[in-house]
Amino acid sequence: MKFIASFIFLLSINFIVFAQAIEGNSETSTDLESFANSEIAIIPAPANLTKLAGHFVLPNSITIQVGKSPELKQTIAFLQERLSIPTGYHVNVINPPAANPTIKLIINDTEDASIGTEGYHLSVGVKQVVIRANKPAGLFYGVQSLIQLLPKEIESKEEVKGVKWVMPCVEVTDYPRLGWRGLMFDVARHFFTKQEVKQYIDAMVRYKYNILHLHLADDEGWRIEIKGLPKLTEVGAWNVKRIGTFGDFITPTADEPRNYGGFYTQEDIKELVEYAKARFVNIMPEIDVPGHSLAAIASYPELSCTPEAINYKVRSGEKIMDWSRGAPPLGLVDNTLCPANEKVYVFLDTVFSQIAKLFPFEYIHVGGDEVARNFWEKNDQIKELMKREGLKTIPEVQAYFERRVETIIQSKGKKFMAWDEVLEGGVSQTAAVMSWRNMQHGIDAAKAGHEVVMSPTQFAYIDYMQADAITEPRVYASLRLSKSYEFDPVPAGVDPKFIKGGQANLWTEQVYNIRQAEYMTWPRGFAIAESVWSPKEKKNWTNFFSRTEEHFKRLDIAETKYAPSVYDPIFSVRRSADRNLLVTLTTEVEGLDIYYSFDNSFPDRFYPKYTTPLVPPVDAKVLKVITYRGKTPVGRMMNMPIEELEKRAGKR
């Protein structure tokens, strides 16, 4: 018996060591295969996870033991809801001590330095689940990981019969790589209701985001009530509804109703701030100045340098800038606040005084991007300002404006943050920079000693198209999931202490509703979440995508929209030596087959399979393609006009 017992003991030890070895080497094929086929698909990937033998079976009467803490109210409510609605089980919450609780949520008496303020330890045993953390936020994130260990049906909004509510036994030690893990939600281009913003918050916290950057004012709308400035919401919050391709709309006529839009009252904002706080999210407000200010100027024309501003209207999506010469753009109307007008600074003092009181977060974002300066160049007030202040260039005029705005922000007890253009004319050392145009601007800012949040277009602009332009709302650039996953917010050669974190930005020119906002955010939001939470060495595309596919199933059940664009083929086109079109098709993920037709019919897996570059038949009008994995279609039916391929290939 002693021999058998010793053998079993050694066998179990070897299993644990084997599991730990797999976990510690995320690059091995063994790890990738086991992960892809396992029950564990946590996003973002935990810092350390060990899979143990056995499973925990959820009992039909669940007891959650947790100490009394107001900060844990939402964590408990979320856990109760998820464990009761889909299962139909009874969930009871008790305070310690308790006899044999199902789940124990514990705030450490002695701080565990290894997990910091947002980390947690999660232990799933055969008989009990225990989550420990130093702070309530850690327990909240531990609960998110716990839910992701349960079957996908746990995301259901109604009871699901016939599911075995089990999860694998694991030991997890987890903590974030970076403190700033943000999503920017533009509610200015199209208004999103208070309830829709809450819906967005609920989705983002599932993936451990902790900053919601609300873009509250732009040319298309002013979205926040400011006492004493009623026209900002009476006039500035409304435009003419247009549907189609933003930026190409015809200019509204004088008699078209301006009834599309909306705004948040100050009570709405307080409610949103509290809602976010309960989920360990800070909301950072942004009022974009001095450019992108047409809604404010239409409300109060005296804020402009340009007399014609008295006739300006809130933009409805018509063209107001000329980008043909690149950045900075030429303004077709003057959508800038006037840096030489003292009324502007009085206005901004009123605005930021109230915003500072409404938003507890330490930063206020003031924009500063894409300022059309051509109206300033010929304005007498600006010329006089330059002479008086010794300003030699127009970028220095904007720098003068930014310094004065920062003084206002600081007078409210807040910190100033702006887009990276503010570096061009010089900015104070205390200004924080959000780097959007590329990584290099963030690198330069960090090397100059500025606090930096990385949100570069090439990785983190989730308003960009996710697949071919024939399937997506047309935007001027593309960003595929695999490219987003390459995001490293802490570039080599930069002191990490200056990199506060990273962020994905959802501009909404082409996003008209919350379902499209979800579609644009997920799954690229998974990729950015993992880039800012998980250890750099844990990142692996194949591993990540296998987990992403499991989360697609979860989002289906949760009725959250997402983009399946990653399954769509990628079209490359060139001309052969005899000037015929040659169409090459590739896929973003491995293991997919592409089937096609040129005869206007809809291909399936019984059609020709793509193996070599295609030459369209002489009279063909459309190439239709679809991707399969084995016998199952996974991609969308794509209809590529031959005429479009001809354009892309260029002249014969």
Image: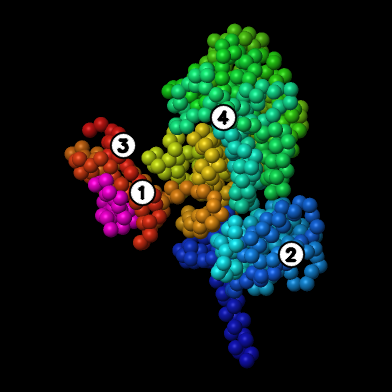
Q: Residues within 10 Å of mark 4 (few under 14, many from 20)?
A: some
Amino acid, disc 2: Asn
Counting residues from the start of the chain, the first of labels 1 and 3 encountered is 1
486 in magenta? no
Q: Position of residue 559 (x, y in %)?
A: 54, 52
* Residue closest to the eye, 194 or 40: 194
Mark 4 — residue?
260
Amino acid, disc 1: Met
Mark 1 — residue?
637
Q: Position of residue 138 (x, y in %)?
A: 70, 55
Mark 3 — residue?
644
Q: Residues within 10 Å of mark 3 (few under 14, many from 20)?
A: few
Residue under the image location 57 percent in, 70 percent down: 164
Q: In the displayed image of the protein, which residue is found farthest to the bottom? A: 1
595 in magenta? yes
Counting residues from the start of the chain, the first of labels 2 and 1 encountered is 2
Residues at marks 3 and 2, CA–CA distance in whole angstroms: 60 Å
Which element type, helix, strand or loop, lies under badge 4? strand
Mark 2 — residue?
92
Give the magenta range.
Answer: 592-612
Q: What sort of colour scheme is used for the picture?
A: rainbow
Give the number of the disc on residue 69: none
Amino acid, disc 3: Glu
Residue 544 showing in the rendered view? no
